[in-house]
Image (tube, rainbow, N blue to C red):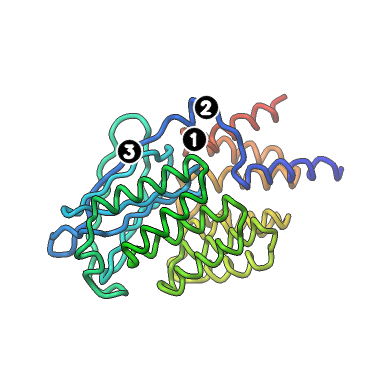
């Protein structure tokens, strides 16, 4: 009786750490997206930073810098729901979610930033944004190739040229995490928090870094505090569920996965995890219902492929 739930927990841990292997053909399918960032008067914002995040994808984040016409573009995004955030010195950051497809054309994702954000205006007024875009692409190419030391050097060089691009600390932290250098990763995220104390992405990254290094209590404390903040996002709820799941707290995990699913009913990742929680409780019928829901609401996701595979096992 004890052996079966334990097996599901161990199998789930592999999924939780993002190690589920997908076919090479699926990995090759990526999408492109672009858009424009303007101020409230309609003027393009040169040197604004646009971040794309999807914790269920690999790579899970992308960055871009706008040119002198406020335009940006990204390539290499996996199909799924991504969170996009645009920021610029002296303006309030704005964000939202969009479904990215790998076949066909994705509609532009545009932003209008109101004034009043931290850091004053004009932080990149004299910068060569084409050069910054090229440098950013170089750094991300290193990341994609697994050359993490080179990526870190490239990102740090970019910060020397444009210190107001504090979001780059997220990418530096991610590179350190890939090297399992958790102390350096936490330092990078804390540097970002020092510049932007309410940056949710940095808070989530700190929580997940602590989880990866095995400090469950620190991860729980960080993300639990973030989940209580007004406007906490689906990513905070989902990742807090991951912490509870890793601690084998099934009820706690289900609570936060459900909040993540409620925040975005089309996101298959937390729904899939609710299915795993049901399996660990021995409720195969409930688990099957959750997995079928993944197939219905997010059929092109990695979780849909996993759900289909598990359903096949349950029916045997």
Indicate the quadrant where residue 1 lies.
Answer: top right
Question: Judging from the image, what secondary structure is the residue with disc 1 in?
Answer: helix
Q: Position of residue 44 (x, y in %)?
A: 16, 57
**Direction from residue 114 to residue 212 in the image, left or right:** right
Indicate the quadrant where residue 208 lies.
Answer: bottom right
Label 2 vs label 1, nearer the camera: 2
Question: In the depicted view, which residue is nearer to us: 182 or 237?
Answer: 182
Mark 3 Cα-neighbour bin, 10 Å: few <14, some 14–19, many ≥20 = many
Question: Judging from the image, what secondary structure is the residue with disc 3 in?
Answer: strand
Question: Judging from the image, what secondary structure is the residue with disc 2 in?
Answer: helix
Q: Position of residue 265 (x, y in %)?
A: 46, 48
Indicate the quadrant where residue 120 lies.
Answer: bottom left
Q: Position of residue 211 (x, y in %)?
A: 64, 59
Q: CA distance from mark 3 to mark 2?
A: 19 Å
Q: Earlier in the sequence, mark 3 or mark 1?
A: 3
Residue at 30 percent of width and 74 percent of height: 119
Q: How many numbered marks appear?
A: 3
Q: Which mark is residue 24?
A: 2
Q: Earlier in the sequence, mark 3 or mark 2?
A: 2
Q: Earlier in the sequence, mark 2 or mark 1?
A: 2
Mark 1 Cα-neighbour bin, 10 Å: few <14, some 14–19, many ≥20 = few
Q: Which mark is residue 32?
A: 3
Label 3 vs label 1, nearer the camera: 3
Residue at 68 percent of width and 67 percent of height: 217
Q: Which mark is residue 296?
A: 1
């Amino acid at each position: 009786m004890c052996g079966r739930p334990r097996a599901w927990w161990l199998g789930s841990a592999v999924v939780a750490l993002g190690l589920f292997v997908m076919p090479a053909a699926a990995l090759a399918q990526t999408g492109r997206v672009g858009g424009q960032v303007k101020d409230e008067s309609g003027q393009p914002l040169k040197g604004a930073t646009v971040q794309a995040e999807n914790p269920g994808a690999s790579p899970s984040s992308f960055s871009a810098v706008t040119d002198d016409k406020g335009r940006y573009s990204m390539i290499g995004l996996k199909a799924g729901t991504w969170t996009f955030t645009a920021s610029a010195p002296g303006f309030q950051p704005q964000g939202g979610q969009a479904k990215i497809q790998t076949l066909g054309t994705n509609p532009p994702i545009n932003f209008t930033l109101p004034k009043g954000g931290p850091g004053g205006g004009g932080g990149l007024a004299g910068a060569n944004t084409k050069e910054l875009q090229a440098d950013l692409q170089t750094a991300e190419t290193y990341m994609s190739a697994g050359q993490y030391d080179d990526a870190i050097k490239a990102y740090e060089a970019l910060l020397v040229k444009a210190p107001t691009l504090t979001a780059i600390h997220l990418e530096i932290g991610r590179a350190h995490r890939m090297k399992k250098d958790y102390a350096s990763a936490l330092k990078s995220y804390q540097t970002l928090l020092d510049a932007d104390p309410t940056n949710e992405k940095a808070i989530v990254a700190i929580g997940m870094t602590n989880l990866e290094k095995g400090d469950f209590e620190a991860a729980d404390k960080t993300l639990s505090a973030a989940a209580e903040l007004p406007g906490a996002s689906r990513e905070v709820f989902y990742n807090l569920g991951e912490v509870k799941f890793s601690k084998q707290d099934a009820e706690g995990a289900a609570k936060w996965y459900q909040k993540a699913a409620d925040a975005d009913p089309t996101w298959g990742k937390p729904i899939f995890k609710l299915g795993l929680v049901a399996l660990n409780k021995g409720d195969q019928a409930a688990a099957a219902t959750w997995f079928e829901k993944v197939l219905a609401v997010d059929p092109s996701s990695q979780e849909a492929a996993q759900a289909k595979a598990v359903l096949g096992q349950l029916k045997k």
